[in-house]
Amino acid sequence: MATNGKPGDNRRHGAVKDRSQAFNPTTEQWVKSDTETGKFMTAKQDSTPFKGLRKESGK
């Protein structure tokens, strides 16, 4: 997982490992998935991408 660094700097250091996200154009939501198992974990309702997760290409 990503580390938070010094307290009070309000940012994440590095990317979240073993996770990725993809955009679902049907529902217009970003879906988070586990890269080891390939299972979908959750989706964001507000159409903005998750912070700190790499994006998968849809092709």
Image (spheres, rainbow, N blue to C red):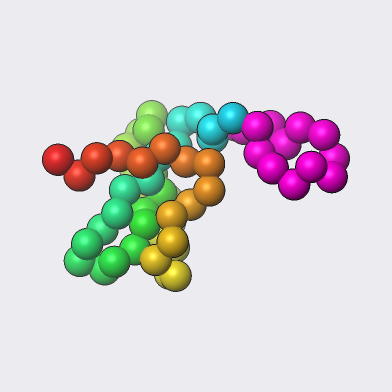
- Tell me the quarter of the picture where residue 54 sits: top left
Where residue 9 appears, as percent x and y from the top left, is 79, 42
10 inside magenta stretch? yes
Where residue 57 appears, as percent x and y from the top left, is 24, 40
Compared with residue 29, is residue 51 higher up or lower down, i.e. above or below? above
36 inside magenta stretch? no
The prevailing secondary structure element of the residues shown in magenta is loop
Residue depicted at 38% across the width and 29% down the height: 36
- Tell me the quarter of the picture where residue 45 sits: bottom left
Furthest residue in direction front, as rendered:
9
Furthest residue in direction left, as rendered:
59
Q: Quadrant of the N terminus?
A: top right
For the residue pair 46 and 38, the one nearer the viewer reads as 46
Where residue 7 appears, as percent x and y from the top left, is 85, 40
Residue depicted at 51% across the width and 30% down the height: 17
Task: Name the side, left or right, on which 13 lies relative to 44.
Answer: right
Compared with residue 8, is residue 27 higher up or lower down, i.e. above or below? below
- Tell me the quarter of the picture where residue 21 sits: top left
Residue depicted at 41% across the width and 49% down the height: 32
For the residue pair 25 and 19, the one nearer the viewer reads as 25
Residue depicted at 54% across the width and 35% down the height: 16
Q: Which residues are magenta?
A: 1-13
Q: Quadrant of the C terminus?
A: top left
How many marks can you see? 0
Q: Would residue 20 be seen by someone viewing this image from the given angle?
A: yes
Q: Would residue 34 be seen by someone viewing this image from the given angle?
A: no
